[in-house]
Image (tube, grey):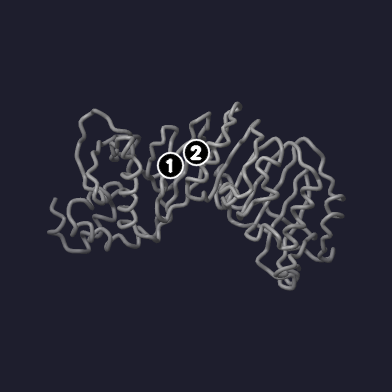
Amino acid sequence: MILSKYPYLVQQEILHNMEYTDLFLLSFVSTRMKKLIKSSQMNRFKSIGSIVYGVDKKEQPCVYIPDKPFNKTIMRIGDYTETKSDFQLNVYGKIIDFRLFTGYHCLYPVASIHPSQKECVIKSIHNYFLDFFGNYVEYHWRVENFEAVEYYIPTIPQLKNVSFGISMYLNVLFADMKNLEKFFSSSPVLKSIKINPKKTTEPFSPDSKFYQIESIEIQQLRHTFPALLSHFQGKQAFIRCGLCEILDLIAFVNKWKSGEAFQNLEYLTMRIVCDRVSRTKILNGIGPKYIDDAKQPPTHSVPKLQDWSNSNRYTDPIISHCYVVRETDNRVASVSIRSNTLYFGVWNKTEEEFLRMAN
């Protein structure tokens, strides 16, 4: 079939019914074909929302568009193989060998890359996507369920317009904090991380890029590793720990109130598993204010920056008569203490605006 022989509307309809991976491959036919696909499919591309580099334990990304019930795979990036390639493509200045892989109800290309060339080839592929799909699509690099062991931690490439997230499990014997610090310092600042430190107790340095991560979900024995209640600079923290000093929870709230720290914070939960949380002691220590008992307080809930469990896109709601006010800008945070958990939700509202929301 020669596509150019058909009227533009027919061409548009044919392209609109093609899979994304087919459009990707077809775009290499010629510059004219690439322009036709981009112009005719612009609205379709804008509706994509996001493109994900899903990285497995071998650090071989599968590039896909999230969808239900099945993600729409565009391509996969694999290690070089001696198997003869099916074809070659010039991808943003790099000649790359490709093999065709037939999966479950799908056919997609696999780039065959030598390990020494992996990062530069991935950059070329990503730059091609930026040009082809456009900047209005969000790009995510996700490493899930990675077990970090001694002397081996995943690498993350430097890519434009990409948010990076990693789900990392530290091996029970892991103690190579120097290497872990090196990983965070050499990587782009992550948008999200899920981490289980196990028995590791050596602290991060206070200026570690770990504390700049926007969203952190962590399960730890003691809240002092990492010391999120002291050094966190991000937006959302979901902490589950065995033991925590009540005075440290009080200090956290009072640092926020004074404007000394946590200026970017939107939401924090602190669940303490092996110790009792005294609601009375915390409230006496933070000096909160209260909405009139006769009024219904507003509900605080914000979209999660990363939902690792794929169960709830929003944070657990906070409905509390108790609140604190930040001295520097009169912003409000709702405070709730229940089931051995501290819930702390920051409003983009002044105290006067917040109180008007109470019914």
Vertically, is 175 above or below 108? above
Q: Amino acid at mark 1?
A: Gly
Labelled disc at residue 141? none
Q: Is residue 122 above or below residue 302?
A: above
Identify residue for label 2.
144
- Which percent across, then down, holds residue 23? 27, 51
Q: Residue at x 65, y 36 (%)?
A: 202
Q: Amino acid at mark 2?
A: Glu
Q: Residue 207, image x and y in percent?
A: 60, 50
Q: Nearer the viewer, residue 8 or 230?
A: 230
Categorize mark 2 by other alpha carbons within 10 Å: few (<14), some (14-19), many (20+).
Answer: some
Residue 305 at x, y percent in the picture: 55, 52
Is there CB contact under 8 Å for labels 1 and 2? yes
- Of residues 52 and 40, the one nearer the viewer is 52
Q: Secondary structure at mark 1?
A: strand
Q: State left or right for residue 297 relative to residue 2.
A: right
Helix, strand or loop at disc 2?
Answer: strand
Picture quarter containing residue 101?
Answer: top left
Residue 321 percent coordinates (x, y):
80, 60
Instruction: Tell me what residue is drawn at x 57 percent, y 42 percent.
Output: 194
- Taking depth in this image into account, of 138 and 210 the one nearest to the observer is 210
What's the residue at 60%, 47% (across, down)?
216
Q: Which mark is residue 54?
A: 1
Q: Nearer the viewer, residue 71 or 6?
A: 71
